[in-house]
Amino acid sequence: MRSWTIHNPMLDTWFWTDSAVRRLLDSSFPAWLAKLYDSYPHAINRADLRKYVVLYAVGGFVADLDVQCLRPVTPLLDWLESSRCGCVVAEEPPLHREFLYSAAIPSTHPPFLYSLAVSLFSHSSLIQSTLL
């Protein structure tokens, strides 16, 4: 996380705990999403869904703890603001591409995130793809 604050001192850095995400789910999302979150057998499964819950509710950048920031994100933010794109999703190593990991998104509640959550609920076996 330190690399993010070194290269982007103007950004706030938040570390979302399991309990904080659970409170967010309970206060801001339909009960079925919390039920889905609770149904995942492994922490990694919940971590994947947690990223999209936070992005949908707050916006910003989400990165795994093992993702290092190599340069300021200001050019990316400037491009995102001037483009018609609603989000940016980073490319991951082939091993991680089974499911989306790192992402950035504005705090405008993009419809695709809701569609992603509905898709996860409808096809909950998809989340199993994150297990090695």
Image: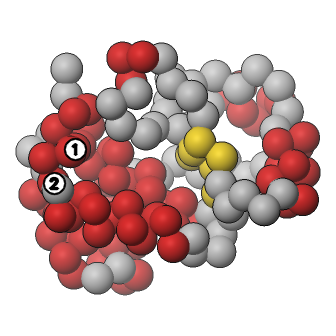
Q: Going by the image, does 63 lie left or right of 120? A: right
| Amino acid type indicated by mark 1 | Ile
Q: Going by the image, does 55 lie left or right of 10? A: left
Name the residue carrying label 1.
127
Name the residue carrying label 2.
124
Say whether residue 77 is visible. Answer: yes
* Residue 4, x across and y down, in percent: 72, 33
Q: Quadrant of the C terminus?
A: top left
* Point 87% across, 49% down: residue: 79
Q: Quadrant of the N terminus?
A: top right
* Point 42% across, 16% down: residue: 94
Say whether residue 61 is visible. Answer: no
Q: Say if mark 2 contacts mark 1, CB within 8 Å.
A: yes
* Residue 93, x across and y down, in percent: 48, 17
User: Height in image: 95 above or below 109?
Assistant: above
* Point 26% across, 49% down: residue: 46
